[in-house]
Image (cartoon, rainbow, N blue to C red):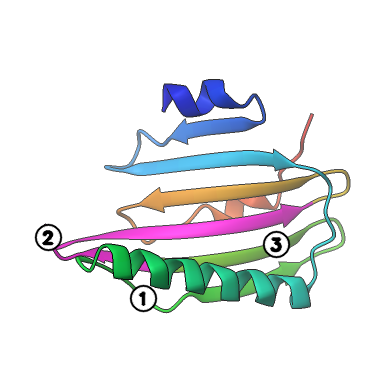
Amino acid sequence: MEYLESFDSEIDLLVDTTKEYRMIIICNSPKTKIDVASANIIRQQIELSFGVKEKINPLLTYSKIKGKWKENTTHKLAEYSTEILDLSINSKLYNSIYLLSGPSFTLQIYEVSNDPETIEKYLWTSKVL
């Protein structure tokens, strides 16, 4: 984790100590226009990547990606979530990827947790200083 943080100053790594296991990685990106069409293309690419990962490690299975699109007057949010089952230890992880676009920023947010509750509701107040 220290390597990841030191690798790029635009990456923030958070560990939620109120949960048994929750890690959140936030990456600042150049301001990018996100719309429904591009969000669907990204979902398809994520599905392909998960398919490759399953072939490499058949002890990991990925559920179908649940995609969401939401927007308000200041933010646009594409969310992709999946459940990962590790057959070797019979445990589940929940993986969510968010693309959040605000007035002057775009963030890529990766969340991995053993709890299906996500951070999505907190993202609507995001600001980049």
- Whether the magenta-drawn stretch holds residue 5 is answered as no
Disc on the earlier residue, 3 or 1: 1
The residue beneath circle 1 is: 63
Disc 3 crowd, CA 10 A, few/some/many (<14, 14-19, 20+): many
Q: Quadrant of the N terminus?
A: top left
Mark pair 3, 1: CA separation: 21 Å
Q: Which three-letter amino acid code belongs to the residue tagged 1?
A: Ser
Q: Quadrant of the C terminus?
A: top right
Which segment did they paint magenta?
A: 83-101
The residue beneath circle 2 is: 88
Element type at mark 3: strand
13 or 51: nearer the eye? 51
Q: Position of residue 90 (x, y in %)?
A: 13, 63
Between disc 3 and disc 2, the foreground one is 2
Disc on the earlier residue, 3 or 2: 3
The residue beneath circle 3 is: 77
Disc on the earlier residue, 1 or 2: 1
Element type at mark 2: loop
Instruction: Say left or right for 89 vs 73.
Output: left
Instruction: Name the residue at 36% across, 64% down.
Output: 53
Instruction: Name the residue at 53% across, 67% down.
Output: 46
75 or 40: nearer the eye? 40
Q: Which three-letter amino acid code belongs to the residue tagged 2?
A: Ser
